[in-house]
Image (spheres, rainbow, N blue to C red):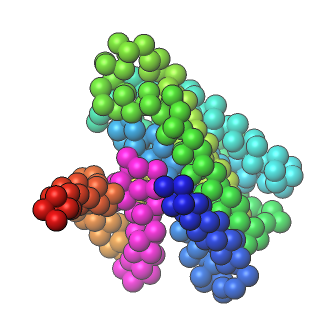
Amino acid sequence: MSAMRLAAALAACVGLAVLALLPTYVDAYYLALAIGLLQFTVLATAWGLFSGPTRYVSLATTAFFGVGAYTVAVLGELLPWPVVLLIATAIGAVMAVIVGLSTLRLSGLHFVIFTFGLAELIRQLVIWFEVNKSRVLGRYVFVDITQKDIYWQLLVLAVAVFVIGWLIARSRLGFALRIIGEDETVAKHCGINVTIAKVTLFTISAVFMTLVGAIMAPRWTYIEPSIAFNATISFEVVIMALLGGAHRLWGPALGAIPLTLLFEFLAARFPTASTLIMGVIFLLIVYALPAGVVGLWDNFRRQWRPQRIEQGAKA
């Protein structure tokens, strides 16, 4: 087993080195595609950190993503880039704590509706502020960040989200959240502080989403509320996580990679019907793969293992 783990670690290091060198060997189109893949891999995995174990379906991804983008739009020219990212992280964390304390008592459909409304509420607040206070609806983003810089920063963020997710899954917090996902009442009777556990993981997830929005902001040059707070992002992230299997750390990435490529194709070939097609894909995933690709693989392994044991016993 140790040899297998060593081989897996070595393969991961080689793969990471290849990904780090990718921008030096591909043209602008493939670099942009790689940035999109990393963006949605981080967003879907961050979504799965919270929604996977707790089974809370959140549509607040756009809210945190947009807040990160607008932080860069407002402060990008005034402060050094690392300081801007730190401020975006702090804003996302504070907002997540406030939202978590006020909404995580909800569950089911009520939580879904509230998180979707939250994104729309923040978008409308930004529009009101821009129109009435700053007197401009959009902002130009002028920061000395190249496409390669965006790629490498997203790659670091992807590594961080997987490492933190791996640590959480093996911690008391991860164990507590799995109990909450199974039965929240039982978790309370076991002495678990349900509120703190949920708010903590919700905040960690939101911070990653906020940082993705901040890192992606220089790519657009011009930002307005309809771009930063695009509700489609929330739905795409949910579809990707569900396709791969949100209950496993690496499951959302399995859904993010093929669906990012598919949505890129649909947006280029069928721009007016891409949203409709995305909705159909979402329905198919929910009904055909309720546990995602990872769940399908787990079922296959459970069916295959008894047959292997039986064949070994006959031999």
Q: Magenta residues, as a range?
A: 242-271
Q: Answer above or below: position of 119 versus 302.
A: above
Magenta stretch: residue 277 in it? no
Please report the residue visible at 78 percent of the width from the left and 48 percent of the height from the top.
Answer: 84
Camera sees residue 179: yes
Q: Position of residue 79 (x, y in %)?
A: 86, 49
Please report the residue visible at 23 percent of the width from the left and 54 percent of the height from the top.
Answer: 302
14 sits left or right of 292 in the view: right
Q: Answer above or below: position of 45 versus 314.
A: above
Please report the residue visible at 42 percent of the width from the left and 79 percent of the height from the top.
Answer: 265
Q: Quadrant of residue 105?
A: top left
Q: Position of residue 309 (x, y in %)?
A: 20, 57
Q: Quadrant of residue 185?
A: top left
Q: Position of residue 81 (x, y in %)?
A: 82, 54
Total numbered labels:
0
Looking at this view, is 288 or 192 the one in front? 192
190 sits left or right of 66 in the view: left
Q: Main secondary structure of the magenta part?
A: helix
Q: Answer above or below: position of 30 versus 177.
A: below
Magenta stretch: residue 265 in it? yes
Q: Position of residue 281 (x, y in %)?
A: 28, 65
Residue sitting farthest toward the left: 314
Quarter of the image with the C terminus in it: bottom left
Please report the residue visible at 44 percent of the width from the left and 47 percent of the height from the top.
Answer: 48
Camera sees residue 271: no
Looking at this view, is 152 or 189 the one in front? 189
